[in-house]
Amino acid sequence: MRMYPQLKAGFEILDRDHVHLDTLLNELQVLNSRLASSNTEDKALVEQLHQRLMDASELLSQHLTDEEDLVIPILGLN
């Protein structure tokens, strides 16, 4: 970072994404466990799990694109 301070903001965004992804993955684990242990059909729980999966998918897709946009050019700087 010292060599390329202009990249700091980009890496801060990626770091925040990591925190958000960690939260989403924990929520997915909790929801999945609740669904797996449920003895009844819980449509609201299924919808909640589906929405969290969609949120995680969108964030992960954007995050990976952002990482590629930031990291790949760095490889060519040296």
Image (spheres, grey):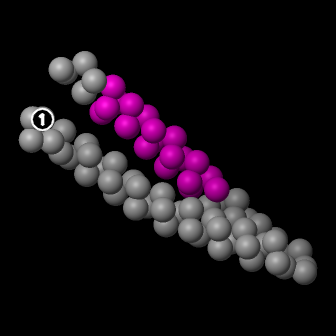
* Image quadrant assignment for residue 49: bottom right
Identify the residue at image location x=64%, y=56%: 53
- Look at the numbered disc 1 and give the secondary structure of its residue: loop
Tell me if 39 is positioned left or right of 61 in this view.
Answer: right
Up/down of 47 relative to 53, above or below: below
Is residue 20 found inside the magenta-colored segment of the image? no
Quarter of the image for residue 15 reads bottom left
- Residue indicated by mark 1: 4
- Above or below, 32 against 58 in this view is below
Question: What's the magenta region?
Answer: 53-72
Residues 53 and 19: in front is: 19
Numbered circles on residues, count: 1
Q: Is residue 27 left or right of residue 49?
A: left
Q: State left or right for residue 77 relative to residue 38.
A: left
Amino acid type at mark 1 = Tyr
Q: Residue at x 56, y 55 (%)?
A: 55
Q: Residue at x 68, y 71 (%)?
A: 31
- 54 on left or right of 38: left
Measuring from the top left, give residue 24's x and y in whole percent.
53, 63
The residue carrying pointer 1 sits among few (fewer than 14), some (14 to 19) or many (20 or more) residues within 10 Å by Cα, namely: few
- Where the C terminus falls, by quadrant? top left
Q: Residue furthest bottom?
A: 39
Q: Quadrant of residue 36?
A: bottom right
* Front position in the image: 44 or 60: 60
Residue at horizontal 90%, vertical 79%? 40
